[in-house]
Amino acid sequence: MTVTRTSAPTTPVTTARNGLDGVLARPGDPRYDEAVATYNLASPLHPSAALTARSTDDVVAAVRAARRAGLAVRSQSTGHGAGSQASLDGTVLVRTALDVPVRVDPDARTAHVPAGATWADVVTAAEPYGLAALHGSSPTVGVVGNVLGGGISFYGRGHGVAANHVRSITLVLADGRPVVADADHEPELFWALRGGGGGFGVVTEIEVELIEMTAVVTGGTFWDASDAAVVATLWEAWTAAAPTAATTSLRLMNLPPLPGVPPMITGRQVLVLDGAVQVPRAADLDLAHRVVADLLEPLRAAATPVLDTWHVASPSRLTLTHLDPPDPIPYRGEHALLHPLGAAGVARFVEAAGPGSGTTIVSAELRQLGGAFAAPERPGGAFDCTDAAFAYVGLGLATPDGAGATADDLARIAVATGPWRTGFTAPTFVEGRTQPQRTFDDATVARVDAVRRTVDPDGVFAGGVAPVVDRPAAA
Ligand SMILES: Cc1cc2nc3c(=O)[nH]c(=O)nc-3n(C[C@H](O)[C@H](O)[C@H](O)COP(=O)(O)OP(=O)(O)OC[C@H]3O[C@@H](n4cnc5c(N)ncnc54)[C@H](O)[C@@H]3O)c2cc1C
């Protein structure tokens, strides 16, 4: 069956005529609003029909109903990645929020994670066993979207991308069949799912591997942005030979006054260095303290911080280090993977995003890569490593009166970092389909496409496939 698309975003779907059997909600139905809600308020979604799936049976029913109606199918879990969704005209959006808990197997060191669970759900369930997961910086990001896009964690320089630590993925295919993909069953599909750019089916569960972690040394050191050039130059030089136990991030931030956020870091631009040094076993704590001291002491000596919060914490506290907003906000972002910047690159970055640039964006970040991100212990899926030194991510508010300034700021930083851009991007950090993106080489693109043609010959999920573009596409 060929999937056809309708043109109007809110095309009414008449259940009786199209055979949707009352499974799917249409615009105007509160169940529709629940299913289409996004974290990025600047990226509303307008599918033709929607459903919040609480079980695998719900997903199967939705896929079958959509096909009977001649509609395409796409998925979301938490809506954190809504900015990268293409138009949902003629499409059923399945929000996966499966009504089962995360199940940890401490002996196997794995967690069975239902689609819809967040990284906070996983680390909370794993912590009593001295285990942690390769979660991203935010507790509210969903495991499925994060892992399918690779997943860049503050444990990543020690362990690589999160997608390399997956045992199995359960999904409902275009014919409505639930299948398990792992190293022994559907191995090519298992490979393509991990970073391949979507378009394979609706995932209902991911079995992730957990890592031994008794504690982390984590926190942030904040400086007035006037110290950015000197501190950022020292940090960038440290990253070249940094121990893999540490994964850090350097950001220029403009935070408005916020409840619970120390006033000395709001209402002004600050430079913040945060991240984690892992402590797998109690005996590793002294070494972790030395790593933090080696990093921070020269920086503290070069410029006096306005706030310093590094401390020993339980692994679940790491999801709070990066101060990611827990509640939905309207924003726009831009991302690129970068080569080592050196002093010249740091200077250009600070010039474009720091004091004197006039920037209003909330955050211009350099996330430290290298280590196991570049040389993983074992190969994983389609996106299993990157040899970039940094992931740049710029984020600004996309409120009606702020969106223009944000776009200008992001464009200026893009130009400034241009000479250091690798030409590649990390899938999870791409915000929007019109920005340049490329995850892998053409041979990998072809291999992933071959898997898609096999499992979804009619293109039911084709509308969700991440585009391969090196330059901004037409909006
Ligand atoms: C505050 C914040 C902090 C972040 N920090 C990090 C970080 O540290 N590291 C990092 O790597 N990324 C980070 N991200 C990016 C995040 O990992 C991606 O946006 C990711 O796609 C979110 O996944 P989700 O499931 O929560 O979002 P969703 O919007 O629900 O899903 C994103 C995409 O995943 C796919 N998907 C979701 N559910 C399913 C399903 N059931 N079946 C099939 N496909 C599905 C779809 O293609 C969907 O478009 C951050 C994002 C935010 C907003």
Image: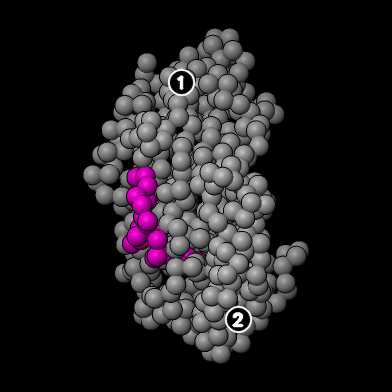
Q: Amino acid at mark 2?
A: Asp
How many C-alpha atoms fall within 10 Å of the one at disc 1: few (<14), some, or many (≥20)? few
| 241 drawn magenta | no
Provide the residue designation for mark 2. 224
Q: Determine the residue positioned at 43% across, 57% down.
A: 160
Residue located 58% across and 76% down the image: 286
Circle 1: element type: loop
Residue at coordinates 55% horizontally, 70% vertically from top-left? 284
Q: Is residue 215 above or below residue 173?
A: below
Compared with 242, 313 (above or below) is above
Whether residue 447 is visible to the viewer of this picture, yes or no, is yes
Disc sitting over residue 177 in the figure? 1
Does 22 sit above or below residue 86?
above
Q: Which residues are magenta?
A: 361-387
Do the residues under discs 2 and 1 have CB atoms within 8 angstroms? no
208 or 462, which lies in front? 208
Q: Name which of mark 2 and mark 1 comes first in the sequence.
A: 1
* Identity of the residue furthest to the left in this view: 443
Task: Mark 1 and ligand 1: say if the CB distance to the nearest ligand atom is below 8 Å.
Answer: no
Q: Is residue 128 left or right of residue 186?
A: right
Q: Quadrant of residue 276?
A: bottom right
Q: Nearer the viewer, mark 2 or mark 1?
A: 1
Of residue 333 and residue 426, the one placed in the foreground of this image is: 426
Q: How many marks?
A: 2
Disc 2 to disc 1, C-alpha distance = 56 Å
Q: Residue at x 61, y 87 (%)?
A: 304
Q: Residues within 10 Å of mark 2 (few under 14, many from 20)?
A: many
Report the side of 200 relative to 122 (left or right).
Answer: left
Q: Nearer the viewer, residue 252 or 299?
A: 299
Q: At which x and y percent is residue 465? A: 39, 37
Q: Main secondary structure of the magenta part?
A: loop
